[in-house]
Amino acid sequence: MKILTWNIWYKEDPKNVLELLKSTEWDVCCLQEVMRGFHPEVEDVTEYLKKNLCVEGYFAIAQGRSEKGWSQGNLILSRLPIADTFSYFIQDKSDDLEPSFSDEGRVVTGIELENSLKILATHMSYTPQFEETAKKNTESERLTEYLKELEQPFVFCGDLNAVPTSNLIQNLSQDYKNLSPNFTEPTWTTKPFSHEGFEVDTLTYRLDYMFGSKEVEMIDSKIIQTKFSDHLPILTEIKNN
């Protein structure tokens, strides 16, 4: 089974996202920063991708923006039959009309396949220079506690907005198998980034990951090179023992 994880970047043209997904071989695809009401020509990116790829999918909203009338969340697409879907907030939705990247809601989105394998994805909070703030640590703790209570087998992936040396990634690496390329290989950023005094304009940071429970074996994993989005996708082939 091949699983792809990719933060598609809320500004990216959905047609470009569709192009990459059509040209890449995958069975389950986990996408972050999936928009509703943002792109003028594509009202609902979830429905657009499901229709044009002829696949099943489950979308969980992380945060809405009342003033702008749009929302964003995580989407899992599957070419395999989905037996169940679920979601869990690791940071509750903000009541602010325009919350900061650090304060907005963050949700784990999950599906269960007919073979009982669960596949989960999330997009965690951004902090300047990926600092481990008290709020981000609380979010990380809610995530790790949730994973510990989850019935195995499972694969967990996404844009964690955390560097390999962070406590979060170190803890996940101890408890689960790394199903992605070596952490020295960067996935962000392919486009200039500037926010609250933090500026990056080169492919420097590893922020995207995939982990699995003990029953899951990695056959192969690679980072896909693309000009679309500010993140690079990770494609991993696994075997569920």
Image (spheres, rainbow, N blue to C red):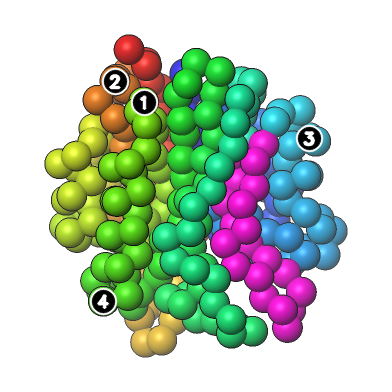
Where is residue 237 shown, x and y percent of the image? 40, 22
Which type of secondary structure does the marked residue at label 3 adopt?
A: helix
Q: Are marks 2 and 1 in contact (CB under 8 Å)?
A: yes
For mark 2, does the 10 Å Cα neighbourhood hold few (<14), some (14 to 19), or many (20 or more) residues?
Answer: some
Can residue 221 be seen?
no
116 displayed left or right of 73: left
> Bounds of the magenta span?
57-76
Q: Are marks 2 and 3 in contact (CB under 8 Å)?
A: no
Per the image, the residue denoted by label 1 is: 153
The mark closer to the camera, 2 or 3, is: 2
**What is the number of the mark on residue 215?**
2
Question: Disc 2 or 4, which lies upstream in sequence?
Answer: 4
Labels 2 and 3: the sequence-earlier one: 3
Q: Is 155 in the magenta?
A: no
Left or right, 171 with reference to 35: left
On-image quarter of the C terminus = top left
Amino acid type of the residue tagged 1 in the rendering: Pro
Kindly report the distance in space between the C-alpha atoms of the residues bearing marks 2 and 3: 33 Å
